[in-house]
Amino acid sequence: MSNVVVDAKFIGVSSSVMDVLDSVRLELTFLVSFGLLWLLCHIFRMRFGSVPASRKPKVVWTAGPRSGRAAPKDSASADPAPAKARRRSAARLAGGNSSNSSEAILDLQNPTHEQLCDGAWVVAAMQHLCRTQVQRSLELYRDATRAGLDVGALTPPQSAELFMGLVTSAIRLNQPRDALKMLRECRQKSSGVNSALLASATRMCTSKQFYKECLEIYEFVAEDKSLVVDDRSVWSCLIFCAVEAREFRRCIDFFDKLKAFGAPSQKDYGNMIRYASTMGDWQMSLSLIHEMREASVEVDNVVYNTSLATCVSANEMDKARILLEEMERSEGIADVITYNTLAKGYAKMGYLKKCFELFDHMKARRIVPSQVTYGILLDCCINDKQMDKALEVFNNMKEQGCAMNTVLYTTLIKGFARVEQVDRAMEVYQQMRSDDLHGVTPDVITFSILIKANCDAGRLEKALGLLDGMMELHLCPDEVIFNNLLGGCIRDANHILAKRLYHSMVEGGIRPSNATFSILIRLFTSCRQLDEAVEFLKTQPAARRIVPEPRLYLQLAQACLRDRQGKRAAEVFKLMLEQAPPTAAMIGSLLSTCAKLNLLSTGAELLAAAADASMRVDARDA
């Protein structure tokens, strides 16, 4: 009975094991296959690929104290070059002279004194480090010079290789000044700087955007009058650097030297066109384009547009129009920027009719006007005070589906404000606020124009409403806006509101200016609040850390004299002598007002105060 039970248990266990094996049969198959493949590869390598231990190069890794990481003492095992060349290179770097050495040791982190004094070893090490550890290459050279390396004993090829690596390494490390020092050492300790070294330095400085430093390097090298630089890339780089560094006086000389060694490229002509544009030389610009066509060099629309802008800036509109016609003869050269540039010129000169003729011509050539195009037309109409025409352009722009923006709306508002059509300006503002399609919102400039227009029109309540609108849009009003609001308070003689606005301005962190103080003094004097005006002038400039201008005291003193407040005028004058000494003309102006108003005693008091302060007074005023 017990045997039956044991057999049953054994059968149950065996069944469980078989179930497990069946579930992992794929994994077992993979493991067995992988093991067989590994065994076959191992047998094959042991039989056919064995290498005698005596022939294996020994690779020793050392932790360099400078870098803090392992560095190989022999990199020959990773070198795909022939074994003989590897051993020769490693032996040279190791400072040894045996090509049969089975262990080539290269320790660039801890070179010996003999190695640092060995010019051949240093040059070879520099070549290696310049590709992998640029900073270490410069450090190695400094260590070698301190150890007594005689650079002058190097052969010319070795010297050229050494300084080529040093100069390019310094520029790669963003140390162009160190590169210039290396060039000086090259001249002092070796045969001098050759054209190949100059070419590498200028190209690398240009790519790293060291424009001024590149020009300094050339200046130093050019001191050697015997050096002939026939590499066109050097002169191309120098032209570009001169333009970028705004050293324009060099451009023509570089360009002439470039042409002496071959035809300039399209980029060279482009840089010279930029130079001509900066100098405003439209004649040179057109001459360069003519030269490009004669040399069969492609003239792209960037060059054309730059030259066109130069003509427009010089008000040579006829030349610009001729250039446009030339551009239109080539397909795809004239673009919307071309027509906008010419339109700006017409707008600047007030040629409204020609602006619209060019606009029609542009559309006839199927050039789609941009926001800038419509903005130019709006400005032209506004400057000519043709607001009906401006509104027509604005509405046409919206009908054509041109994307509206804040600048376009603000431009139209500015036009209506300029001709004192405040209601129409406010209508455009309301359109702007309701333009949900384009998501256009007014900015600080928009509100500044509208607030000033409403204040000038005596509509202070409307202006304050616009201020609230700014706050709703989380826009911070600036000093100009508050000054306009304070100026609006003068018309209504509302000094209480003005003081409230001034305190809001200060509490909001907006620093007042002498213009702000002048407006408030004018407000206080117009409201016959002379005591408050004097107190304000005594305290606020110092409290706001503003140096008061003498004209503020002159303004208040004149107001006191006109109100026949002689003592108050004398008080202000004495305050002016302490805080902002007046000129002789200012003193003469006050004395003249005293004479006209028959305030002779006040005039005498002012004259005495000026004399006590050793101020200069015109004899005619005295």
Image (tube, grey):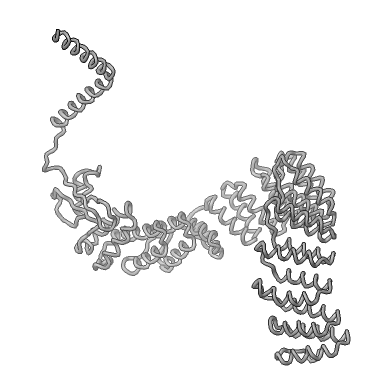
Residues 406 and 263: in front is 406
Residue 116, how many percent across, how many down? 23, 62
Q: State which quadrant residue 571 falls in.
A: bottom right
* Quarter that holds the C terminus: bottom right
Q: State which quadrant residue 584 falls in.
A: bottom right
Residue 612, how many percent across, how many down? 72, 92
Q: Residue at image x 69%, y 73%?
A: 540
Q: Residue at image x 23%, y 15%?
A: 18
Q: Spot the residue most to the front.
A: 1
Judge whether residue 322 can be spotted in this image: no
Residue 390, how many percent across, how many down? 81, 49
Residue 192, how many percent across, how many down? 35, 65
Residues 206 and 504: in front is 504
In the rendered view, does 97 fall on the left or right side of 421? left
Q: Residue at image x 65%, y 61%?
A: 280
* Quarter that holds the N terminus: top left
How many numbered circles does the render carry? 0
Q: Is residue 519 above or below residue 580?
A: above
Residues 196 and 367: in front is 367
In the rendered view, does 173 fall on the left or right side of 586? left
Residues 51 and 481: in front is 481
Judge whether residue 132 can be spotted in this image: yes
